[in-house]
Structures are given as structure tokens and as C-alpha cells.
Image (spheres, grey):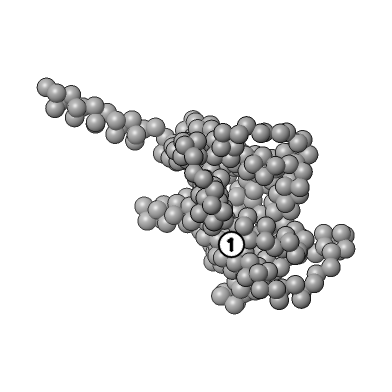
Amino acid sequence: MKDKNSIGNLLALLTMVIWATTYISTKVLLQNLEPIEILFYRFVMAYFILIIIHPKFKKLHKFREELLFISAGISGVTLYYMIENVALKYTLASNVGLFISVAPILTAILSNFFIEHGGLTKKLVLGFLIAMIGIFLVLFNGNFVLKLNPMGDLLAILAAFVWAIYSVILKKINNKYNYNNIYITRKIFFYGVLCMIPIIMYFKIDLHVNKLMIPTVAFNILFLSLIASALCFVMWNVGVNYIGAIKASNYIYIVPLITAITSIIVLGEKITLIVILGGCFILAGLYISQNGLKNPLKFLTIIKRRDSFENN
């Protein structure tokens, strides 16, 4: 059980580290492709990659089962990414990052009603508040420019809510059906892509496949489909299965921190004391959300006892 817990935490952490760097690839692709094109190519390729890895199909059973997979595909693939991309058009990226970081607490609230009671604990709320202070410091880095844009900000909160719904649905699927995680991810991708087709037709988006021949486009689409989608979604699904939707979602807190570190390494941005302080708050909030204050306080008590013993 301890091994599963460790693996689940590691997979959730690794997934968020990779997802935090995808904004660079998306920015590059937006120079040649529309947001819906990026999503369509990304998840179609990821779907076929997973078919190659796990080509087995299963017979359809109950409609309720398919409804869960359809809901997961719509929420976790189509709606979340579409809403997030549209939000970025109406508000600042820092606002989107801040508001999407409420996903863990929303996941806890939904889990409390639909999966198990008692999920919304004091340690989770305290960890959330501490992490949000850190996220605020990292995102704004001493420049308080929080300009509220109702349309974009509400969409960002909606995106966080949609991701929370996806996490809860995913946990329900894992609880009810003993399926291979690659099969689960592949099926979710299938319904996600299927739901993109009406959007493409409605907005009359032309899918120019020849654009995929551009080296930078090909490289970044491959990264998003193979690593950020096929691999990361499978890792995330395993993580949620092992440690639960709430604990896995807590790792969303580190996304702004990883993004800041990536900007420092790739874009040459300067590291500041505020970013370091914010990073400490984020890590502290994440730890408290997962473990509470019991262990750190116990550790401090041991140190105090040792000091008093040495003094005497």
C-alpha cells in the first residue's frame, strides 16, 4: 500500500511538472494553428499512439458506464482546454494561473458530495490558503497588476471547476471498473476528440494537415500528443487511482512554480526573493494539504527537547 501511495504521489507530481512546461509549445503552435486545431491534432495523435500501445477493445456493456467515459472525455479533454484557451484571450495569463489553482479545493468539495464524505478537511483548507499565498507571490512577483476581467476570470474559474469534475468522474471510473489505465485514457480521448468535431464544424475551422510538415509545428505537436497527452494522462489516471482525486489535484499548486522556473531557465528571466518565498509557501501548502501539521510539529518538538537536554 505504501508503494502505491509513493508511486501515486510521484506520478501526480511528474505529470504536473510536464504540464507546467506545455505553455511554451502551445505558444509556438499558436503562430500557425488555431486553438481547436492544436487540441484536435494533439488528442487524435495521442489516441492512435495509445491504440498502438494497447490495441485491445472491449464490448460495450451498460449505457451508464459509457456515460461516465463520455463525461470524462467532454470535461477533461474538450471543455477544460477549450475554456482555458478562451479565458487567455480575455484576461491575463497570471489571472488564469491564479484562478485555475482553486481546482484542488473544488475537487475536494465535489468529492465530498459524490465520492466520500469527509474529504474536505481542515488540513486541506489550510494547505490551500497557504499555497494560494505562494501562487500569488510567484505569479505577480512583486508587481501587483491583478486586473479583473469578468469574462476571462469567470472562464478560468469555470475551467478549474470542469477539471475538478473530470477528476471526480475519473475516480468513479477507477472505483467501479477494473480496466487497464491505458484503455481508460484511450477511451476518454476518443470521446474528447468526438466532441471536438461539432465545434470544428460550427466554427468552420479548416484543418490544414500540410501545416504539420513545418518542423517546429511537428516537433511541438509530437511533444503535446506523445508526452503531455498520451503519457501524462495515463500517469495522472494511475495517480488518481492510487492516491485519490483530492491528493492528486493538490499537485496543481506547483504548476505556477514550475512555470516560473522554466521561464528562468528557458527565457532567462531573473530569479527574485519574492519567487523563492512564494515557492516556499507553495511547497508548505502542498505538504500541509497532504500531511497536515502533525508531522512538522512533532519534528519541532523533538528539536526543542534535544536543545533543552543539551543546555541542561
The amino acid marked with disc number 1 is: Ala
Quarter of the figure with the C terminus: top left
Query: Residue 220's spot in the image, x, y percent?
Result: 63, 66
User: Where, by quadrant of the figure, is residue 173 drawn?
Assistant: bottom right
In the image, is residue 39 above or below residue 209?
Answer: above
Query: Residue 249's spot in the image, x, y percent?
Result: 55, 46
Element assignment for label 1? helix
Using a 10 Å C-alpha cutoff, classify the residue at mark 1 as few (fewer than 14 neighbours), some (14 to 19) or many (20 or more): many
Q: Residue at x 62, y 57 (%)?
A: 24
User: Where, by quadrant of the figure, is residue 110 drawn?
Assistant: top right
Q: Is residue 296 left or right of residue 40?
A: left
Query: Residue 277's spot in the image, x, y percent?
Result: 46, 36
* Residue 108 appears in view: no
In the image, is residue 26 above or below residue 84?
Answer: below
Which residue appears farthest toward the top when viewing the image?
Answer: 312
User: Where, by quadrant of the figure, is residue 295 drawn?
Assistant: top left
Pointer 1 residue: 228
